[in-house]
Image (tube, rainbow, N blue to C red):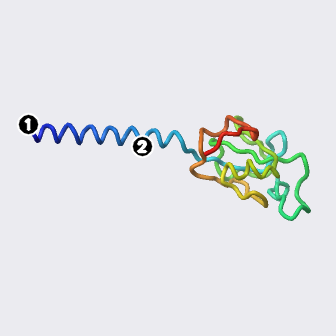
Amino acid sequence: MSSRTVSLTSTFLLLAAGGLAACDSDEYVDEGFYCADANGVIVDEDYCDDDGGGGGGGGGFFIWHSSGYRSGYPIGSKLPAGGSKFAYNDAASRSKFGLPSSGKIGNGTVKTSVVGKGGSGSGSRSSGG
């Protein structure tokens, strides 16, 4: 009878561990980041560089992000639908996604373990983790 109890207990623990792992994978996602204009057309990352206050792009450029973006989209191409954007100089949004608070972010940058399900919100989301 004791071997049956041990077997049931270990089966339960394995199921519980699997359930916790599934919950963890829903909480963290990979996000791809690109510098693009308001329409989602990719531009050179220099346009989203706010480091040093000079140069940079001005008001018409954004950092677009989505869990559906992969690296390798060329400059001039339109990003796939479903992404979100925030101003390239929005330090709070950059930090929320684990990006440097200023400076250049390379097109196609992928950040792992971004909290939440990506691609559906905007830069004004205030939830974090």
Which residue in the structure is indicated by mark 1?
1
Quadrant housing the N terminus? top left
Percent position of residue 36, x then y: 80, 47
Tell me the mark number nearer the camera, choosing from 1 and 2: 1
Q: Is residue 28 above or below residue 50?
A: above
The one of 63 and 9 positioned closer to us in this rendering: 9
For residue 62, side relative to residue 28 (left or right): right
Percent position of residue 76, x then y: 81, 48
> What amino acid does circle 2 point to?
Ala
Q: Residue at x 70, y 36 (%)?
A: 121
Provide the secondary structure element on which disc 2 rests.
helix
Tell me which numbered mark, 1 or 2, is placed earlier along the sequence: 1
Q: Which labelled disc corresponds to residue 119?
A: none
The one of 115 and 61 positioned closer to us in this rendering: 115
Which residue in the structure is indicated by mark 2?
21
Q: Residue at x 59, y 40 (%)?
A: 116
The one of 16 and 41 positioned closer to us in this rendering: 16
Provide the secondary structure element on which disc 1 rests.
loop
Q: Residues within 10 Å of mark 2 (few under 14, many from 20)?
A: few
For residue 103, side relative to residue 118 (left or right): right
Q: Residue at x 59, y 44 (%)?
A: 115
For residue 43, side relative to residue 58 (left or right): left
Q: Residues within 10 Å of mark 1 (few under 14, many from 20)?
A: few
Q: Residue at x 70, y 44 (%)?
A: 65
> What amino acid does circle 1 point to?
Met
